[in-house]
Amino acid sequence: MAVNALYTAMAAAGGGRNGYTRSDDGLIDVRLSVPKAMGGPGKEGATTPEHLFAAGYAACFGSSCEFMSRQLKLIPKSIEVKCAVGIGPDDADGFGLVVDLEAIVEGLSPKEAETVVAAGHQACPYSRAVKGNVDVTIKVTAK
């Protein structure tokens, strides 16, 4: 599948998981640290690649759900997405990710909210990128 990129984001990292990462526009400029739960130092004031991925996935997933809600003519009052990204050893002697998404949809029935979120999941570039490689669970809450 060929992609005609309309926008390209750029960032650089040094020092791996105990280093730093910065975007080329300077808006992201953070220190990284392996969390204590993974045997690292868990440096105060530092974040993890998983936090950065969770933030990006939540935003992209929410936009995809909003886009699909307009396509389906099922317009909610709001959609909030919470994303949890876990990392740990996998069964192939490496590490893998797991993702839990929660979409809180206000102003639609539970069935309509499920329809919008399922369509958003199919359209989301992040969901498509991890499909078949990362276990993703989705919870939909209609308010």
Image: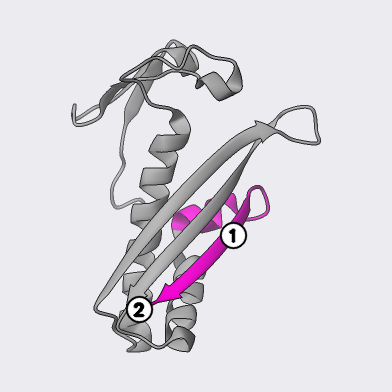
For label 2, the crowd category at 10 Å Cα-Cα, with few meaning under 14, some 14 to 19 and many 20 or more, is: some
Residue 121, given in percent of the width and then of the height, sits at: 50, 66
Q: Is residue 107 left or right of residue 3?
A: left
The answer to whether residue 2 of the structure is visible from this angle is no
Residue 27, given in percent of the width and then of the height, sits at: 19, 31
- Asked whether 126 falls inside the magenta stretch, the response is yes
| Quarter of the image that includes the N terminus | bottom right
Q: Which mark is residue 143?
A: 2
| Front in this rendered view, residue 43 or 73 | 43
Q: Residue at x 46, y 61 (%)?
A: 102
User: Can you identify the residue that label 1 sits on?
Assistant: 137
What type is the residue that disc 2 sits on? Lys
What type is the residue that disc 1 sits on? Thr
Residue 66, given in percent of the width and then of the height, sits at: 32, 72
**Sooner in the amino-acid sequence: mark 1 or mark 2:** 1
For label 1, the crowd category at 10 Å Cα-Cα, with few meaning under 14, some 14 to 19 and many 20 or more, is: few
Q: CA distance from mark 1 to mark 2?
A: 20 Å
- Which range of residues does the magenta coloring cover? 125-143
